[in-house]
Image (cartoon, grey):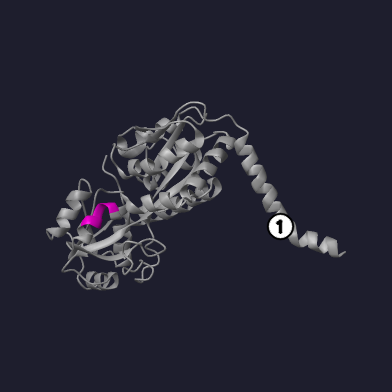
Amino acid sequence: MRSLFILLTKLPSLILFVTLFNHVSNAQNIDWPTKPVRVVYPYAAGGIGDAIFQVIGPALEAKLGQRFIVDNKTGADGKIGTLEVVNAKPDGYTLLMAPTANYSVNQHLFPNLGYDPISTLEPISMVAEAPLIAVTSISGPSTLREFSQQALANPNKFNYGSPGTGSPPQLAGALFSQLSGNSIEHIAYRGTPPMVMAMMGGDIQLAFGSWSAVGTQVKAGKIKPLATTGSQRFDDLPNVPTTREAGFPDLNLTNWWLISGPKNISPKIVSKLYLALKSILSDPQIKSKLGEIGHVAVGLDPKESALFIQSESLKYKNLIQKNGIKIEQ
């Protein structure tokens, strides 16, 4: 009886061990990759996605023994490159490296997108995430709560800028305006640099940007950080509260990057690639290099990534519909 009791108490651990063993064994029992793998990045070269893959790509090549070649396929807000992966042969040799917009936002902005990312792509791993930094001018309010109170007291006096309608910074600004009585007007710019210049020139009073976009100006004391949208405080801004700490728990929009393949890609390929990415993203040197470009290593597994995409999609759908956000085509 005592032996049976010991066996039963250890059963959950044994099941977990067997599951993990089978997971690893299945991933190893596949002859992939045997040639270079093309990683489609649906934006212009030199962007943050390129920078992330420059960190993890060499480690991926060393671990799997083949080249992983980034292919920049630009146009139509990421639609062209994403569609190329959606329509690719699901053999593991064409992958997608794309941000939040391509998985959870664009389907709610473009009525004729031509594909549903949730049903046509197979998530492999969410690899990295970056909080957005809420910034204002040096003479602006000292806290996010104070900014909200001033906006409520002075409707339409304040503007928030973004690098374009439908971008994560614009959606974060729209949500903050919504939480502040819809009292802050949106001004769209053609990219991040003109948005930041507009803030320093006094044309806008608020913006949400990644650390790679606003960090230089923050460190130079030209603009002031009010809060960060991540679940934890940002390492480079330890004294700046999160939006939750600042009193806005729903303002938790981040920009994340996820690798996926076409639907019906072999589960064994997905598993082998995920396990390689998981190992790479747990490396302290990789984490440090990602931190230097304002990102946190994540490494969600395929199922977790799929559930995360669905949750984010619902969040953005509600936000876009409630605020009547539309892309001019």
Q: Is residue 21 left or right of residue 327?
A: right
Vertical position of residue 199 compared to residue 97: above or below: below
Q: Position of residue 267 (x, y in %)?
A: 58, 37
Task: Indicate the amino acid at tag 1.
Answer: Pro
**Direction right: furthest residue:** 1
Q: Residue at x 49, y 32 (%)?
A: 65
> Is 87 positioned to the left or the right of 197 in the image?
right
**Is residue 294 shown to the viewer in this render?**
no
| Image-based side of 296 in relation to 152, left or right | right
Q: Magenta segment range? A: 212-216
Prevailing SS of the magenta stretch = helix
Q: In which quarter of the image is the N terminus?
A: bottom right
Residue underneath mark 1: 12
Q: Position of residue 206 (x, y in %)?
A: 22, 61
- Return the residue nearer the eye: 293 or 285: 285
Q: Percent from the top left, x then y, of residue 320? A: 36, 53
Name the image quarter holding residue 46.
Answer: top left
Q: Can residue 280 be seen in this view?
A: yes
Q: Nearer the viewer, residue 251 or 226?
A: 226
Residue 176 lies, with reference to residue 273, above or below; the image says below
Location of residue 69 (image quadrant) = top left
Residue drawn at 39 percent across, 68 percent down = 244
The one of 39 and 172 positioned closer to us in this rendering = 39
Residue drawn at x 24%, y 62% as measured from the top left: 135
244 falls in the magenta region: no
